[in-house]
Image (cartoon, grey):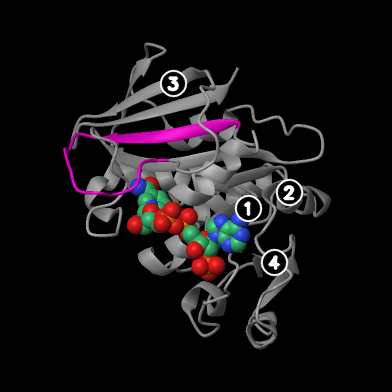
Amino acid sequence: VPAVRQLLPAADDVDVDRAHGLAERPAPAGRPWVMLNMVASIDGATAIDGVSGGLGGEADRHVFGALRAVADVILVAAGTVRAEGYGPPRTSPARQAQRIARGQSAHPRIAIVSGSLDLAPSSPVFAEAPEPVLVLTGDQAPAGRVEALAAVADVHRVGATTVELLEALALLDRMGHRTVLCEGGPSLNGQLLDAEAVDEIDLTLSPTLVGGDALRVAVGGRARARRLALAHLWHDPVDDLLFARYVRR
Ligand SMILES: NC(=O)c1ccc[n+]([C@@H]2O[C@H](COP(=O)([O-])OP(=O)(O)OC[C@H]3O[C@@H](n4cnc5c(N)ncnc54)[C@H](OP(=O)(O)O)[C@@H]3O)[C@@H](O)[C@H]2O)c1
């Protein structure tokens, strides 16, 4: 387990799983608590050559896993599934035990947001999923693709041309899910922000300057400043990553 130093509040090394496991995430009425986890460069890039892998490091993968381990649902947009070659979530036996002790299923459930349903039903994200994958789409999704994906996932239509995010969150709430971890990409994050449905941002700051034209953490929607509160700041002394947890005030 990589040593991560807590800078704020001042403390010695932090147990990442324990800290995220104990953090309070009260679900608002009618929808789950929504947290975003993203890694970004100093200049705000969220990808290098179309993928985020070059920005993180071992401690980032560890924090990423710890956040997944507290989520009931991992919400991700189809663009990120395709770009990052998403597979099923791998939950270590220790994290499975922690989840079960908290009254959760052993593994989080993946929910993919897609209008086109350009997703291969044979891909490991479906075939090897420990919990049935949810596919959230709109009314105009191609019928053949709905049929093909329905054989390997639970497909729900929540919106007309595009998925209505608040409707999708209400659906997850009705299914009993209390904590949603959104893993992007930036266009999905922007829609959640626009819907005022982001309660927490877990931002990994990578000590890199990237340039180029990669998207920033959230894009689209109406620009408006929402002030969050810094709940913690951790430092990874190996790769100089900073982990900031911000929560809605
Ligand atoms: N740094 C990080 O932590 C991080 C995290 C995630 C992603 N990324 C990077 O971000 C990039 C991808 O982000 P992106 O913003 O371009 O794409 P994205 O948000 O991942 O995906 C966009 C796609 O998601 C689907 N979608 C999103 N909202 C929808 C809605 N309301 N209704 C229906 N479908 C919806 C559509 O899929 P269909 O086309 O199937 O309809 C759309 O084309 C990649 O380069 C990835 O590596 C970085």
Label 4: state its secondary structure. loop
Q: Which residue is disc 4 drawn over?
A: 138
Q: For the residue with label 4, is its CB less than 8 Å from the closest atom of ligand 1?
A: yes
For numbered disc 1, what is the local secondary structure? strand
Tell me whether the residue at label 3 lies in contact with that at label 2, contact meaning CB atoms closer than 8 angstroms: no
Q: Is residue 107 visible?
A: no
Per the image, label 3 sits on a secondary structure element best described as strand
Helix, strand, or loop for circle 2?
A: loop
What amino acid is found at the position of numbered circle 1 in the picture?
A: Val
Judge by depth and name the residue closer to the eye, 123 or 50: 50
Among the two numbered marks 4 and 1 on one chain, the one whose residue lies closer to the N terminus: 1
Q: Which residue is mark 3?
A: 232
* Mark 3 or 4, nearer chain start: 4
Residue in the picture at 48% in, 50% down = 187
Mark 4 belongs to which amino acid? Answer: Gly
Q: Is mark 3 within 8 Å of ligand 1?
A: no
Give the Cα distance between marks 3 and 4. Answer: 37 Å
Mark 3: give few (<14), some (14-19) or many (20+) Cα within 10 Å. Answer: some
Residue at 27 percent of width and 47 percent of height = 58
Judging by the rendered image, the residue that carries numbered circle 2 is 177
Q: Residues within 10 Å of mark 2 (few under 14, many from 20)?
A: many
Q: Earlier in the sequence, mark 3 or mark 2?
A: 2
Find residue 22 and report its horizontal and vertical position in percent. Answer: 58, 29
Name the spot of residue 199 as percent of width and height, x first.
60, 31
Identify the residue at image location x=48%, y=80%.
Answer: 123
